[in-house]
Amino acid sequence: MAAPRAGPVELGFAELAPAWRLRSEQFPSKVGGRPAGASGLPGPEALACALCGRPLAFLLQVYAPLPGRADAFHRGIFLFCCREPPCCAGLRVFRNQLPRKNDFYSYEPPSENPPAETESVCLQLKSGAHLCRVCGCLGPKTCSRCHKVYYCSKEHQTLDWRLGHKQACAQADHLDHIIPDHNFLFPEFEIVIETEDEILPEVVEKEDDSEIIGSMGEALEEELDSMAKHESREDKIFQKFKTQIALEPEQILRYGRGIAPIWISGENIPQEKDIPDCPCGAKRVFEFQVMPQLLNYLKADRLGKSIDWGILAVFTCAESCSLGIGYAEEFVWKQDVTNAP
């Protein structure tokens, strides 16, 4: 397969939506809440933070089918992050793809009309697999007393026990249908996609400052020149970033498989050698980036130390290699905002 060709950039915006539109059968692109994956999800080990070991929180998913690829008629990218202080740093991203005819989704497109009855939260997949009551990921562990609720980890079982299941578990009829706010899920939004306008505002060039420097010692002049070049490069990159998003400052995501990302800083830009190849042997290509504007929607400060980033750039297998019904881990690069000295 040839390398993906760059098309127009698609921008994602966070908008509130009714719960039914964010279910897996609607193939949503969305932020927060519980992940919407009908064919299952990566297991608890895959969704543990590589830095602190605690369960990752679902950040967002992007529905990104590949035209002309029967085995990727349905295709989603799922991004998870650690929001547990003092870590708040771990990131993992997974890709899932299926043909149109599969055991999980209808062959026909989903209805645009709301269903007659809407379940508040569904914690069991069609396959029969149970989901964690706290995070909505696979829940292989169960409460040893009532055997009616499921968890991905001891951490989430402990959290739920503390927030009400301890009392509900002892009830004979197990009236435990209302799930408490565990302060773990991010606020939920639909990601609405629009194509980026190709007309960008003009970049205002800075005046030449060569006359300002005047006469000075050669050593000092060289030092200032070196500093100016570094600052100038940083400034140009940041100015390009600001110019690129100026027409749509609320964008939370930029999608364009095979295009070049826009960086917020000249520091910590990955080289080709920094992006690991897919285990299938193919190179990975840029697919989308998460913008810092998303942080405004997440209300992450309530946990103390906040998650933070400048850019999250997601790279996926250039061949989008076939997976069966499983999930393949892809690669995410985090670029922070450079602090001025």
Image: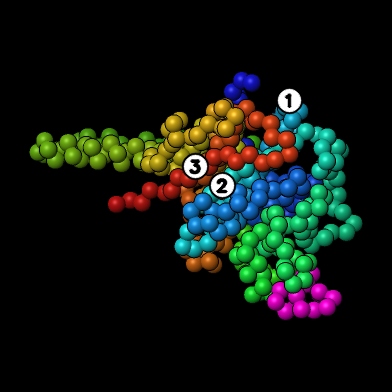
Q: Which residue is mark 1?
A: 68
Left or right of residue 212: residue 46 = right
Q: CA distance from mark 1 to mark 3?
A: 28 Å
The residue pinned by badge 2 equals: 92
Residue 197 in view of the camera: no
Three-letter code, disc 2:
Arg
The three-letter amino acid code for the residue at tag 3 is Trp
Q: Earlier in the sequence, mark 1 or mark 2?
A: 1
Q: Secondary structure at mark 2?
A: strand
* Residue 95 percent coordinates (x, y): 65, 40
Residue 34 pos. (x, y %): 69, 56
Depth check: give the residue in front, 281 or 286: 281
Q: Which x, y percent locates residue 14?
A: 64, 51
Q: Secondary structure at mark 1?
A: loop
Task: State whether residue 158 appears in this view.
Answer: yes
The residue furthest left is: 217
Tell me whether the residue at label 3 lies in contact with that at label 2, contact meaning CB atoms closer than 8 angstroms.
Answer: no
Q: Nearer the viewer, residue 46 or 21?
A: 46
Element type at mark 3: strand
Part of the protein shown in magenta? 165-178
Residue 212 is left or right of residue 199, and the answer is: left
- Return the residue found at the far right: 116
- Number of residues whose C-alpha sits closer than 10 Å to that of mark 3, classed few (under 14), some (14–19) or many (20 or more): some
Residue linked to disc 3: 333
| 7 versus 313 height, above or below | above
Say which amino acid is labelled 1: Gly
